[in-house]
Image: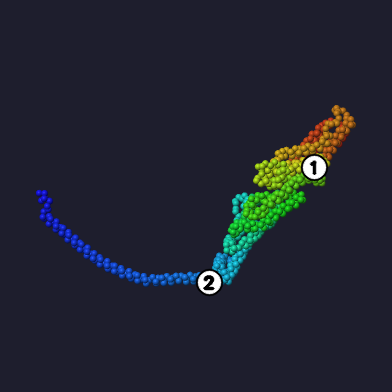
């Protein structure tokens, strides 16, 4: 059963076989189809290979034919390029031979009005010069273009000079004064620009200068520049000076109206009037002070202009040369002022030295700006102002010292003494000098300090009162030094006045003379700031003068003793009412009346011609004397009222007390 079950039935085997045969048949058909296609593919491949082989053969033939042609074409192109380059070079070279001819007209006509075209023309010539120098240095053409280049450079230099000369004009005085006023405290600050050259002209000058430096290898134009500009700077300052001379004395209008209305003061305070000071000299001093300020402003402006034109490493030297003439003229004028002051001192005209003070103050105030402006110039240039300042300080200090000595040594000349005992000319001049000195107290103090005169006035020097420079002191020390100097002058004046007072034979007139002078000194000190300066070193100066004044009043009052001594009870007879006096006793009373009357009349006659200019002092002395005399006279009359000493009492009792008072009220009144 097992065997039979595993054996397939005959029908299934037959069916299976048929399926296999059918599949085999299909596979055989497929194989046949593939074989046919492979055969076709082989055939096509062989055909393609044959075609490609034929194409490759043809390409090789083509390549073998074209490559030689290409190479020939390339060679021809290279030859063409070489020919073009050669022709171009030939044209370029030939052009150098034509430069001289092509540029002849432009060079001859010069650069005026067409600077750019002219410089382009010069550039062509310059390239031609370089070509011939490199390629044909022995050719005559080189000399031709060289000559043309030099001619062109020469005309550029001439144009540089011409433009500078034609357009450089002195700065108008009004514009300079407006520029100076920028230093003042104006309601509205206005920067005044000093335009020395028109902008277009300036640009041409800058362009020419740049070319001359870079291509012209020329520095002569810098000398041309400083000479022309130096002349204009000097002319500008001289023009300002002339403006002062023409306008100061007449109208006093030195500024343009627009700026004048805003100006509070001129750059420097004017020197105060001194005895006999010449107005022309006053104008000259103001002019010089303004010219110093003008020089600084103009020099700064010149440097700004120069910096645009001159190469940087030549600017300081050129500027130094440019300012020399104007600076030297200013310094020479300053030296002349010093010399004039020196001559005045020799004539003992010490007030003339006051002209130095406003100038010296202005120079010192502006020294820092001056130094800044001259920075980088030669030492000899920078030292000019300090040298002038030193000269002025030296002569000024000498004048101060000699003035103090002159006050001490002024001779006691009888004919020079005021007959009325009023203020002596020496006193008024000395006080006026000191008052004017007060206007420049800082300058005067520094002037004294510059001569190391501290020891002269016994001024102790605190180490803190000096700067790094041994000759430079603080303003406080200078102030004490000037105070000591003023006290010395006043002391010398007091001694001299005391000596002069002895010229008077009348001691009362001597007292009036000293009183008037001492009072004048004290009042003058108090009216000005001199008293504050005096008390820096003499705290009790005012009290000292008041004591001196009081002493002289007492000395004067003593002169009336010879009048009032007749009114005393000394030698008066003692009597009882109703008792008849003896002749001797009556005579004593008569002599007293006569002595009083004669003395009163004599003193009033003499002293009426004396003077006490100070009304307050005059009234005080009159009233005091009137009171003393009147009281003594009234008391005397009272004592004599009931005494019968004469048959003619009106002969001796000449004046009523009121009349005596009126007579004394007329003292010191030359009009009475």
Colouring style: rainbow
**Percent x, y for residue 232?**
65, 59
Horizontal side of 607 relative to 285 (left or right) equals right
Residue at left 74%, top 44%?
A: 489
- Of 488 and 473, nearer the camera is 473
Sequence-first tag of 2 and 1: 2
Q: Is 480 drawn above or below residue 148 in the view shown?
A: above
Horizontal side of 8 relative to 490 (left or right) equals left
Question: Of circles 2 and 1, which is in front?
Answer: 2
Residue that sits furthest to the top in the current view: 576
Q: Is 304 drawn above or below residue 157 in the view shown?
A: above
Residue 258: quarter of image: bottom right
Viewer can see residue 669: no
Disc 2: CA contacts within 10 A as few (<14), some (14-19) or many (>=20):
few
**Percent x, y for residue 100?**
57, 70
How far is the residue under mark 2 from the one under mark 1?
107 Å
**Percent x, y for residue 283?**
70, 53
Name the residue that disc number 2 marks.
94
Q: Secondary structure at mark 1?
A: helix
Q: Is 268 drawn above or below residue 541 in the view shown?
A: below
Residue 130: quarter of image: bottom right
Disc 2 and disc 1 in contact, CB within 8 angstroms: no
Residue at left 59%, top 62%?
A: 213
Name the residue that disc number 1 marks.
499
Residue that sits furthest to the front in the current view: 3
Q: Secondary structure at mark 2?
A: helix
**Percent x, y for residue 225?**
62, 61
Viewer can see residue 25: yes
Residue 606: quarter of image: top right
Residue that sits furthest to the right in the current view: 583
Horizontal side of 283 relative to 666 (left or right) equals left
Instruction: Return the mark for residue 199.
Output: none
């Amino acid at each position: 059963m097992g065997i039979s079950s595993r054996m397939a039935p005959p029908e299934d085997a037959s069916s299976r076989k048929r399926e296999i045969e059918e599949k085999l048949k299909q596979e055989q058909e497929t194989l046949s189809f593939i074989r046919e296609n492979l055969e076709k593919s082989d055939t096509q491949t062989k055909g393609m290979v044959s075609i490609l082989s034929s194409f490759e053969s043809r390409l090789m033939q083509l390549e073998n034919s074209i490559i030689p042609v290409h190479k020939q074409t390339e060679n021809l192109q290279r030859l063409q390029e070489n020919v073009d380059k050669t022709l171009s070079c030939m044209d370029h070279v030939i052009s150098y031979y034509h430069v001289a001819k092509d540029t002849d007209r432009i060079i001859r006509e010069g650069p005026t009005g067409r600077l750019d075209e002219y410089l382009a023309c010069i550039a062509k010539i310059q390239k031609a010069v370089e070509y011939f120098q490199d390629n044909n240095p022995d050719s005559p053409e080189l000399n031709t273009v060289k000559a043309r280049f030099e001619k062109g450079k020469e005309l550029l230099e001439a144009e540089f000079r011409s433009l500078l000369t034609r357009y450089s004009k002195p700065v108008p005085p009004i514009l300079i004064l407006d520029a100076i006023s920028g230093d003042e405290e104006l309601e509205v600050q206005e920067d005044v620009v000093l335009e020395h050259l028109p902008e277009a002209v300036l640009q041409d000058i800058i362009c020419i200068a740049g070319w001359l430096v870079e291509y012209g290898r020329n520095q002569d134009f810098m000398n041309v520049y400083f000479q022309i500009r130096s002349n204009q700077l000097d002319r500008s300052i001289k023009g300002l000076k002339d403006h002062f001379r023409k306008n100061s004395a007449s109208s006093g209008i030195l500024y343009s109206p627009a700026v004048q209305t805003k100006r509070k003061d001129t750059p420097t305070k004017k020197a105060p009037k001194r005895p006999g000071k010449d107005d022309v000299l006053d104008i000259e001093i103001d002019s010089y002070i303004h010219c110093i300020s003008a020089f600084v402003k103009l020099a700064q402006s010149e440097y700004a202009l120069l910096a645009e034109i001159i190469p940087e490493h030549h600017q300081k030297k050129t500027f130094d040369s440019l300012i020399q003439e104007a600076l030297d003229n200013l310094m020479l004028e300053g030296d002349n002022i010093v010399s004039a002051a020196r001559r005045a001192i020799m004539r003992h005209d010490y007030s003339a030295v006051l002209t130095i003070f406003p100038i010296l103050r202005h120079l010192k105030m502006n020294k820092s700006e001056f130094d800044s402006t001259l920075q980088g110039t030669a030492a000899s240039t920078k030292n000019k102002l300090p040298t002038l300042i030193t000269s002025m300080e030296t002569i000024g200090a000498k004048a101060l010292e000699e003035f103090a000595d002159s006050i001490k040594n002024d001779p006691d000349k009888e004919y020079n003494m005021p007959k009325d005992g009023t203020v002596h000319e020496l006193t008024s001049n000395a006080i006026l000098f000191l008052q004017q000195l007060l206007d420049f107290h800082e300058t005067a103090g520094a002037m004294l300090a510059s001569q190391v005169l501290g020891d002269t006035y016994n001024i102790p020097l605190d180490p803190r009162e000096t700067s790094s420079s041994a000759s430079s002191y603080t303003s406080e020390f200078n102030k004490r030094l000037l105070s000591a100097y003023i006290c010395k002058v006043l002391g010398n004046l007091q001694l001299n006045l005391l000596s002069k007072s002895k010229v008077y034979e009348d001691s009362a007139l001597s007292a009036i003379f000293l009183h008037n002078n001492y009072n004048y000194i004290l009042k003058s000190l108090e009216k000005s700031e001199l008293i504050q300066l005096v008390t820096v070193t003499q705290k009790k100066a005012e009290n000292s003068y008041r004591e001196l004044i009081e002493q002289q009043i007492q000395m004067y009052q003593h002169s009336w003793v010879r009048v009032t001594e007749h009114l005393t009870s000394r030698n008066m007879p003692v009597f009882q009412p109703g008792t008849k006096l003896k002749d001797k006793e009556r005579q004593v009373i008569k002599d007293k009346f006569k002595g009083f009357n004669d003395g009163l009349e004599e003193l009033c006659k003499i002293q009426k011609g004396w003077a006490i200019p100070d009304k307050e002092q005059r009234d005080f002395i009159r009233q005091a004397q009137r009171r003393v005399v009147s009281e003594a006279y009234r008391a005397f009359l009272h004592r004599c009222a009931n005494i019968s000493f004469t048959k003619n009492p009106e002969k001796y009792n000449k004046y009523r007390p009121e009349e005596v008072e009126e007579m004394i009220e007329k003292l010191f009144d030359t009009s009475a």
